[in-house]
Image (cartoon, grey):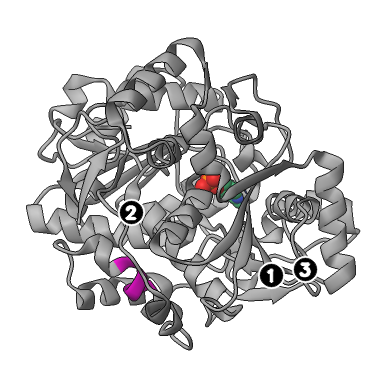
Amino acid sequence: MDYISTRGGAPALGFEDVTLTGLASDGGLYVPRHWPQMGEGDIAALRGLSYVETAVRVMAPFVAGSLTEQELRDLCEAAYGRFSHAAVTPLKQLDHQHWVLELFHGPTLAFKDVALQLLGLFFERFLTNRDDHLTIVGATSGDTGSAAIDAVAGRAKIDIFMLHPDGRVSDVQRRQMTTVIAPNVHNIAIDGSFDDAQAMVKRIFADRDVTDKFTISAVNSINWARLMAQVVYYFYAAVRLGAPARKVAFSVPTGNFGDVFAGYVAAQMGLPIEQLIVATNVNDILHRALSSGDYSTSTVTPTATPSMDIQVSSNFERLLFDAGGRDGAALAEQMRGFEAAKAMQLTNAQREGAGKLFTSARADSDQMMQALRWAYDAAGEMIDPHTAVGLSAARQVALDPSVPVVTLATAHPAKFRDAVERSTGVRPALPARIGSLFEREERYEKLPGTYEAVRDYVTAHATPGKGAAKDAA
Ligand SMILES: *Cc1c(COP(=O)(O)O)cnc(C)c1O
């Protein structure tokens, strides 16, 4: 399989290069040149297969040319062997129509583990092939940092430097990062805000003195390999609910549009999906774009669902490209306009292409809390606030009662104990594998909030690689 850029001006790459590259050199995002097809017979043949076997069948065409099926299987077994549930992503029923798909049984209790655990293994394999060394630099206000650290801890050929604002992440979040003791894990608490930390990371990516000597990379959700790993659980869940004979709908708590775009990919591959519900909180740029075509940014309102507090959704570009007829030159121009004006209008083709599959709904804080409470009252299920936004959206959209609706559960309720307790009156317990967090040794470096301090720390502790050439973002 080869991959092309959404902006039409970067060379096509194979899976290995796409995984290590991130952003395309023309500023676009990589997508497969065509969607591999799974016919009815192929989907029916997934019945009864384990998560790992399902993953191999779904992902094999995307990695063809870079990994054999057996190599892919070995990596999937290693990645998903670390999940605490035998089904990896189990389905729970709430009532006659609604289910939740629990994606949070990975090592850090975040759905991001599903993709990042595999991405860490892809990195290690491909870096060994080309004898390079990767330096991952990131800033986190919480969840992504711990999932990324866990995914690469102890791996050869990779160092990770994760910046967090000192004193401004929760104790659980900090400890999930700082109790991972491995020679390649470098936690840095900076004296400053999350925005300061992020600005420093951006500066490192643009600093030629650093990028000439080190192969610097990020692990953000524009990485194609992350999206690909998320396509799997749409197939896994739909087959369990009767696919291909029965259509299923999904409601997805959405931030950067990565998770829900993976559902779109599943549909393009042939999975019969009735509808994809894009669930947003009050930061509803996607709801506005999908309902009225108006994709214009506004300021971000902080909510109880921080992973959905976004201004722009980077992966939305992939949908605009594919649904709008795959015209890279036209999209490049549209995106240039958007970057200048911070606003744009979707084309008719984009709206029609997206409208076939997507619908959207927003939930404010009251609606989120009501849904959280309903899941607990109706079925005894505790869900986290992000999942509750998804469930609220799922219940707002009118769908035929014969269509099962699956809400993706993106975080373990114990990660957001205060909000869950406010809605249900019950405080979720920390699962055993997280429970010992407070007894474990922490290790991290405190640095002043200046760029020079951070840069000097990174360059003193990172291993040089082949450098530059690679895109950073
Ligand atoms: C990252 C995240 C999301 C948003 O996922 P996207 O792929 O960015 O749309 C939703 N919920 C939780 C808990 C997350 O961590």
Q: Is residue 330 magenta?
A: no
First of labels 1, 2 by sequence position: 2
Dots 3, 1 in contact, CB < 8 A: no
Give how far apart the Cα atoms at labels 3 and 1 are.
Answer: 7 Å
- How far apart in space, not on screen, are marks 1 and 2 (Cα)? 28 Å
Please, what secondary structure does the residue beneath circle 3 have? loop
Tell me residue 144's x, y (percent). 49, 46
Which amino acid, mark 1? Answer: Pro
Report x, y in % for residue 197.
47, 26
Q: Main secondary structure of the magenta part?
A: helix
- Where is residue 372 shown, x and y percent of the image? 81, 56
Magenta part of the protein: which range?
55-59
Cβ(mark 2) to ligand 1 < 8 Å?
no
Identify the residue under disc 3: 401
Query: In the rendered image, which residue does mark 1 sit on?
Result: 404
Name the secondary structure under disc 1.
Answer: loop
**177, 442: nearer the viewer:** 177
Q: Residue at x 59, y 75 (%)?
A: 246
Q: Residues within 10 Å of mark 1 (few under 14, many from 20)?
A: many
Left or right position of 332 against 361 = left
Residue type, mark 3 in image? Pro
The amino acid on which the numbered mark 2 sits, given as a three-letter code, is Ala
Residue occupied by mark 2: 225
Would you place residue 68 above or below residue 364 in this image?
below
Q: Residue at x 42, y 65 (%)?
A: 270
**The image quarter in which residue 62 lies:** bottom left
Rendered-image quadrant of the C terminus = top left
In the foreground, 437 or 290 = 290
Q: Residue at x 47, y 59 (%)?
A: 267
Can you tell me whether the CB of the residue at mark 1 lies under 8 Å from the nearest atom of ligand 1? Answer: no
